[in-house]
Amino acid sequence: MALAALQELSHHYHSGSRSIQVLNGINLEVKQGDFVAIMGRSGSGKSTLLHILGGLLQPRIGHYLFKGMDVFSMSTNEIAIFRGKHIGFVFQMFHLLPEMNVLENVKLPFLYNNTDPNEAESLAREAVELTGISHRLLHKPSELSGGEMQRVAIARALAPGPELILADEPTGNLDSITGEEIISLFELLNTTGKTVVMVTHDQRIAQRAHIIKVLTDGRLQ
Amino acid sequence: MAAYNNSLHLLASLFQLAYFSLKSHPLRTILSLTGIICGTAALLTVIGLGQGAKMEAKKQIEKMGVRNLFIRPAPLTREQFKQAGKRHSPGLGPQDMTILSELPGNIIQSGYLREIRVEPTLPTSVSGLKVVGCTANYGDILDLPLAEGRFLAEEDLRRKNAVCVIGGEAARSLAEAGRLNAYLRINNHLFLIVGILERYDTGHKESGKFSMQNINEMIFLPVTIELSRPTNRGQDLPAYHQSELIVEIDKVENIPTMTKLIDRTLSVAHQGIKDYQIIVPLELLTRASEIQRVFNMVFGAVAAISLLTGGIGIMNIMLASVSERTAEIGLRMAVGATPHHITIQFLAEAALVTAGGGVIGTLLGIICVYWVGYFSHLPIHISVSVAIIPFSISTIIGLCFGIIPARNAARLDPVRTLTG
């Protein structure tokens, strides 16, 4: 059974009186342990697809099954809990909280999933260790480089042990060498059994994935 | 238990985050705190002074006796004075007590006191003592507490015994001369001190609401003893001045009827001249409560407006905070926060501001109450329950005004917040 499956999924946005079709009859199966790259031009709808996979956006048409569960038949609260339990997000802009240090940022998801504080601490330290940022544990984001911030963001996505990691242009804000390091980290995570779906417009980065899907005119090829 | 601990941890973390957020915008936080601080302090001051006045009034009434009526001479206009002379009104005197004692029903007892304009022979260091003549039941009606000896007895009045009872303050200032069984010289007569009163808190210095006689500085003689004062022309005139009648009614509910009856009776006895006034402590209490209620309403409204402004300040800071932190809200949703979590987080911020403002406002209010009380000599009252009311009101107002921004935050679209 696929870990995540999108079935006949379509989505459009309204812009004034115009309706813009971004996704049109998408079918996608992501299996446990896959490393998928979704490519496409800017505005092609690849981020929209990622947001749907993460349960942040409900499509107008179609179904999203995660381990057989129909995600969008759930209530708002249930979807939030689903996200906290099964999904880890990595964003282009890192989205770290500036008032918190590295460890506190990584521990953030545990705040909402009823984890014992001691266990949360230990899992967060493990994730920080795995992403190679443990020497910056008590530093604030403003004291970190771009690559370090993205490592913290990956540790935060990883720490609660989600089955699916969704990365939206994870190297988009980094120089090529740092981008390379980050993509290697994703490869490493994938070898440990994590399923990764990554959105990128960079051909070179996408080629590091096992499966490459290209989004053109709202359709996946 | 684990779930409970985790919820507590969540709440503690949200409060910590709220603290960080407020700390990162000190000026904005201080400005929004100011409204709450002023409102809470104003409300506490109003309540503290209001409660003080209310308790003081109640204390005074209790001292006067709720079931007692006080009848005192009323000041007359020139015209009334002429009329009184024409109609031979005798003014307030012991004869009125006799008239009232013949009234049917509800009068338990009545007492009489008159001021005697004589100067007792006292050590030079002592001044301000007042000599009065009174009936034997005067102490009983006012429930005057005795420190030593006894109060005047019927026997003293009947036999015109040269005895006296002195107030607590009088005994203190007379020192050796004011001991039990010592003699006081008044108008060349010696009076044996048979009783000394305990200091009696009339409160008349703190509040002028009820003109209770200052019992502490009085020397009580049997009312039947006649004293005179010498004049320049060599004649002696009676030395009596102000009089006071106290009537004790059996039940509180009979007071209005009896007041009317006594008024009519005295009016007839005084030939229609209104040279007396009837003071009803119960009415004074009601009037004091009404005045207090108006005072509370007016100043309470001012304080409420102040708190309302504070609440609007909170709403303002919260709305600004939400619009500044949309990306953070989106991220929290992405990592599993439910709308409920987001609402609680922003309410925690409002709660911190209002509780912080409430605590500072309460402390400031307590200082204000004592300060106003010290300089204006108004009675004050501060207790835990008095302090909790404005604190609670300000916190509730803050939370109410925090709800709209918090709900706005919880309703944000996570995709827009993360990509916008």
Image (cartoon, coloured by chain):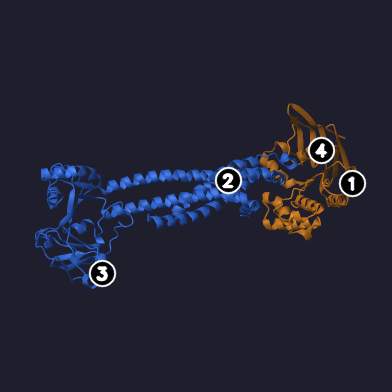
Chain colours: A orange, B blue
| Tag nearer the camera, 1 or 2 | 2
Does A37 sit left or right of B63 as displayed?
Answer: right
Which mark is on residue B125?
A: 3
Q: What distance separates the C-alpha of mark 3 from that of mark 4?
A: 102 Å
Label 4 chain ID: A
Q: Which residue appears farthest toward the front when viewing the image?
A: B233
Between B227 and B368, the one nearer to me in the picture: B227
Mark 3 / mark 2, whichever is N-terminal: 3
**Residue A125: x %, y % from top left:** 75, 58
Residue highlighted by disc 1: A208
Which mark is on residue B314?
A: 2
Label 4, secondary structure: give it: helix
Q: What distance separates the C-alpha of mark 4 from that of mark 2?
A: 40 Å
| Tag nearer the camera, 3 or 2 | 3
Does B351 sit left or right of B299 as displayed?
Answer: right
Q: Decide: few, some or many residues near mark 2? Use Cα within 10 Å; few <14, some 14-19, many ≥20.
A: many
